Image (cartoon, rainbow, N blue to C red):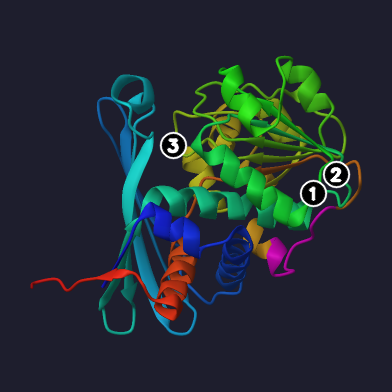
Amino acid sequence: MLLLSRADVERLLTPEACIAAVEDAFSQLALGGVPAPGILGQHAAEGSFHVKAGFLTADRPYFAAKINANFPHNGPRHGLPTIQGVVLLFDAANGVPLAVMDSMSITALRTAAASAVAMKHLARKECETALICGCGGQASAQLAAMLAVRSPSRILAYDQDPAKAARLGTPVSDLAEAVRSSDIVVTCTTARRFFITHDMVRPGTFIAAVGADNEDKQEIDPRLMASATVVTDLTEQASRIGDLHHAVAAGAMRLDQVHAELGDVVAGRRRGRASEDEIIVFDSTGTGLQDVAAAIAVYRRAVDTGGAISFQLGQ
C-alpha cells in the first residue's frame, strides 16, 4: 500500500488531470458503466462524519471509500482544519488495498473539478466576471479549476472575513451587487440559510452551489432554484442533502423539475445550455464517484513517478 499525504496529493494531481478524471467518471455513471455511489452520514455534537464510496474502471476496476470529519468550529476553537479524513483505495478485482491518502486535498480538488466540469458544459463561453462566495479552504481549488475551463477578466471574492476574500480576488462587501455583475457564481460556504436570492441573479448566470453537503446547510433561495434550470451531481442525493432538498421541502419545486444529472449532460444524453439568457444552478453535493476518480488519478501518478511511502498491513 502507498501512504500519500496532503502534500503528495497536491503535488501529483493537477486541476486539469482531476477535471478529466471526474468528467470521465460522470460519463461512465450516465452510460451505466458503474453503479451509483453510496453515502452514509452521522452527526456528532460539534460536527458530522460522512462516508462516500464508489466503484470506477480505469486501467482496472477500483473501489474507494472516503471517511471525512466536518467540524465547522475547528479553526477558531482548536486551530484545526474544518475537514479532515482519509481515502482508502482498493483493487476491485481482488480486494487488495492499494493506498491510503489524505482526504482534505482529495475533497477540495474533486469538488472543484465537478464545478469545472459543470462550467465547461453549462456556463456561457464568454465570462467577464466570476464571484466566489466563501473563501475558506475550498475556494482556492474552485478558482484554480475554474481557470482551467474559463477565463474571467475579473475575480470577485465575498467572505465574512475580508482578509480571506482579499487573498483570493477583489474583495466585495455588497453581495447583491457582486452577484448581479457576475457571469459565474460559486458558493462554497457553511451557511445554514440561503443568501443567494432570486432577485440578485441576472439572466445567463451559471451558479455552482457547493456548500450544501448535509441537510442542515443551504445557500440558494428555493425561488431561484424553481425558476432556474437545475442540474445535480446526483438527484437522489441532492434531494436529501443539497439545495434541492430545501427547494422541494419549501414546495418551490418537484424532483421531476430537475433538468438533468451532470453525467447525462457530459454523456450527451441531455442538453446543456439552451440560450445565453438561461440561468443554470449546479447543485453539487459531492459523490463517492468523484473521490474514486481523483484517488485513481493520484495513485497511478504516484506509481509512475515513485517516491511515495509504502507499507503492508499485518507486518
Q: Which amino acid does label 3 sit on?
A: Asn
Using the image as rendered, state which of residue 139 and residue 23 is in the foreground: 139
**Magenta stretch in the rendered image:** 265-273
Residue 272 highlighted magenta (yes or no): yes
- Residues at marks 2 and 1 touching, judged by CB atoms closer than 8 Å: yes
Q: Where is residue 312 in the image (x, y as percent from the top left)?
A: 17, 74
Which picture quadrant has residue 230?
top right
Residue at the (53%, 44%) spot, across then down: 238
> Real-space Cα distance between discs 1 and 3?
25 Å
Q: Return the residue found at the far left.
A: 315
**Which residue is nearer to you in this view: 202 or 245?**
202
**Helix or strand or loop: what does disc 3 sit on?**
loop
Main SS category, magenta section: loop
Mark 2 highlights which residue? Answer: 127
Figure check: 2 above or below 47: below
Q: Residue 214 carries which label?
A: 3
Residue hosting label 1? 123
In whole angstroms, how far apart are the C-alphas of marks 2 and 1? 8 Å
